[in-house]
Amino acid sequence: MTTEPNEPNEHVDRTLRDAFAVGDDVARRVSDHALAAPPHRPRRAPLVASLALAAVTLCAGLVAWLSRPPVRPSHVTTAPANVTELTGSFVDGVLIVPIPGDVIVIAGPGQPDDRPPEGSGVVLLEGDAR
Amino acid sequence: MEANLDADLERTIRDLAPRVLRYAVARTGDVSAGEDVAQESLEALVRHWRRAGPPESAEAFVFSIARRRAVRAVIRRRLWVPIEHAFGRHDDAPDPEAQAVARAEHVRVRAALARLPRKDREALLLVALGQMTSAEAAVVLGLSLSATKMRVHRARKRLATELGNEDDD
């Protein structure tokens, strides 16, 4: 049978109880609130459901963002503002377009090429003609 | 019959309230968090009692819940307090000198408690502040009676030494 010494115990316990003394009014308030507790615990389902929904939405957004197709540079070229229409024709797969302006800017997938036209020019295009 | 049950419940709650409050305040290190923990634990007992009758040991029931909730409260506090400080939402209530002096003992004991091994401290708080018997504390801690007694004894001895050392300084 084990025994616990009493005197030092009492001193330490009293020190602890004094340090963490609780007012009667606080104890009464806590008791009153506890005794007035509703019969069922307040449901937290809506909060949990909202959090779960937010998490699922976040994950779906993340997956969609990660699986987005890689961005490719556009091959669409736009005509300069001062040129309303260019007309040309294909000859043996080569599109021949007369250039009416002063400068032609060819900005293909490679390097841009600025050169002064001499009344007309030849543009080599790759890809399907539509 | 039901009136007797309610009277027993009320008597139990009134008896347990200051004990669980002291334990929860010491365990969380915060008066308001301690009050929340104590109240939630007592509410759980009230609900259980009214639904299924009194548990085998009301003390063990309440203190087991208080212990778990106190852990959560401590974690929550550690997470939120830095944020509240960052947003300037910490308690700005004036802390007059008299209040500071009154709290000095509390702070000193808390500091000494913090130096105890966690499991020993837990056992001591249940017995000294929760006023549980070693057998009841053993149920809450999931330890054997002898192991619980040993932890409480060791914690008391160490705490007495810690407080004594401070007095010597």
Image (cartoon, coloured by chain):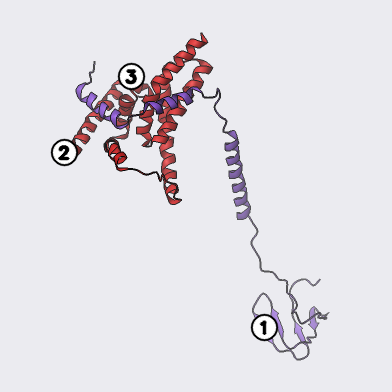
Chain colours: A purple, B red
Residue drawn 47% across the image and 22% down it = B45
| Residue B34 image-quadrant placement | top left
| Location of mark 2 (residue) | B168
**10 Å neighbourhood of mark 3: few (<14), some, or many (≥20)?**
some
Query: Which of the two discs, 2 and 3, labels the residue nearer the N terminus?
Result: 3
**Label 2: which secondary element:** helix
For the residues labelled 1 and 2, the Cα–Cα distance comes to 89 Å
For the residues labelled 2 and 3, the Cα–Cα distance comes to 35 Å
| Location of mark 3 (residue) | B135
**In the displayed structure, does residue A18 sit left or right of residue B37?**
left
Q: Chain of mark 3?
A: B
- Quadrant location of the C terminus of chain B? top left
On screen, residue A62 above or below B156: below
* Disc 3 residue type (three-letter): Ala
Question: In this rendering, do the residues under marks 1 and 3 share a single chain?
Answer: no
On screen, residue A47 above or below A10: below
Q: Residue furthest left?
A: B168
Residue drawn 58% across the image and 44% down it = A55
Residue A83 visible, this orientation: yes
| Location of mark 1 (residue) | A113
**10 Å neighbourhood of mark 1: few (<14), some, or many (≥20)?**
few
